[in-house]
Image (cartoon, helix red, strand yellow):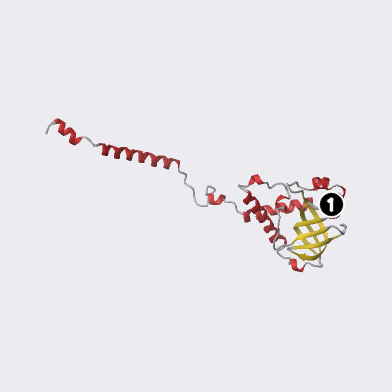
């Protein structure tokens, strides 16, 4: 066998060289992936499932603070009606929290429940003009985002998207129903005297749709 022939037999072929290079590259890639991989324990703060938005948890967490704030700032209905009649805009700015569709105002109502219709009970309020209609949302369906917007502390920028923002409002309403109406049957309120603390959006000064945070039936 000549020297040239020996070299031809012992020298690695191009195919073998590609295999070796591929193996080296694969090892390097796997090493880089391992270096960049973070091990997350299930249930830890790093578990993304723990970070998913829960409307129910949000409502349960936020409603007590909303309730306390509304009770603290609530204006007696007669005083508020007088202020609105004198200057609706000034009354909204003084007592309410601004939203894009009108100020949300906290109010205290004392009067007698009457007609129930479409998830609300009307109230005849002491000291209010007879033409002012007051309805209290008593469920089971509670609509709107007045409770969410009542304090000004909950804003759209705190959420990922509009759906979450809407879900937050619904969850607060649901928590209110559990807290306020847990022991009250709205069907049995007609004719009963009560004090209600809640909020309403000032749009029509003669039509108040109040979402309550506290209902004390006498």
Q: Mark 1 Cα within 10 Å, few/some/many (few <14, many 20+)?
A: many
Q: Quadrant of residue 54?
A: bottom right
SS at badge 1: helix
Q: Name the quarter where the N terminus is drawn.
A: top left
Along the viewing direction, whichever of 132 and 32 lies nearer the viewer: 132
Q: Quadrant of residue 180?
A: bottom right
Along the viewing direction, whichever of 96 and 118 lies nearer the viewer: 118
Image location of residue 162, percent across then percent down: 63, 49
Image location of residue 61, percent across then percent down: 66, 53
Task: Tell me the residue at 42%/42% (across/down).
Answer: 33
Residue pointed to by mark 1 = 80
Q: Is residue 36 left or right of residue 201?
A: left
- Residue 104 higher or lower than 125, as above or below: above
Task: Tell me the residue at 79%/56% (across/down).
Answer: 208
- Residue 166 higher or lower than 190, as above or below: above
Q: Quadrant of residue 190?
A: bottom right
Q: Looking at this view, name the residue that lies furthest to the left.
A: 1
Image location of residue 167, percent across then percent down: 64, 54
Q: Is residue 27 left or right of residue 193?
A: left
Along the viewing direction, whichever of 131 and 75 lies nearer the viewer: 131
Q: Looking at this view, name the residue that lies furthest to the bottom.
A: 188
Q: How many marks?
A: 1
Q: Name the quarter where the C terminus is drawn.
A: bottom right
Q: Is residue 31 left or right of residue 151?
A: left
């Amino acid at each position: 066998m000549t020297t040239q022939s020996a070299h031809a037999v012992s020298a690695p072929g191009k195919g073998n060289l590609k295999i070796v290079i591929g193996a080296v590259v694969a090892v390097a890639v796997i090493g880089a992936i391992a270096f960049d991989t973070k091990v997350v324990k299930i249930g830890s703060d790093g578990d993304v499932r723990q970070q998913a938005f829960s409307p129910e948890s949000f409502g349960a967490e936020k409603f007590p603070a909303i309730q306390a704030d509304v009770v603290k700032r609530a204006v007696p209905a007669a005083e508020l009606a007088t202020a609105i009649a004198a200057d609706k805009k000034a009354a909204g700015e003084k007592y309410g929290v601004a939203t894009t569709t009108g100020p949300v105002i906290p109010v205290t109502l004392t009067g007698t429940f009457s007609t129930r219709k479409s998830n609300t009970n009307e109230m005849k309020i002491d000291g209010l003009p007879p033409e002012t209609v007051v309805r209290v949302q008593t469920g089971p369906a509670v609509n709107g985002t007045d409770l969410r917007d009542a304090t000004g502390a909950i804003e759209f920028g705190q959420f990922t998207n509009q759906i979450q923002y809407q879900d937050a409002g619904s969850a607060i309403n649901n928590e209110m129903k559990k807290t306020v109406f847990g022991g009250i049957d709205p069907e049995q309120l007609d004719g009963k005297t009560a004090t209600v603390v809640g909020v309403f959006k000032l749009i029509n000064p003669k039509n108040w749709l109040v979402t309550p945070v506290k209902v004390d039936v006498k």
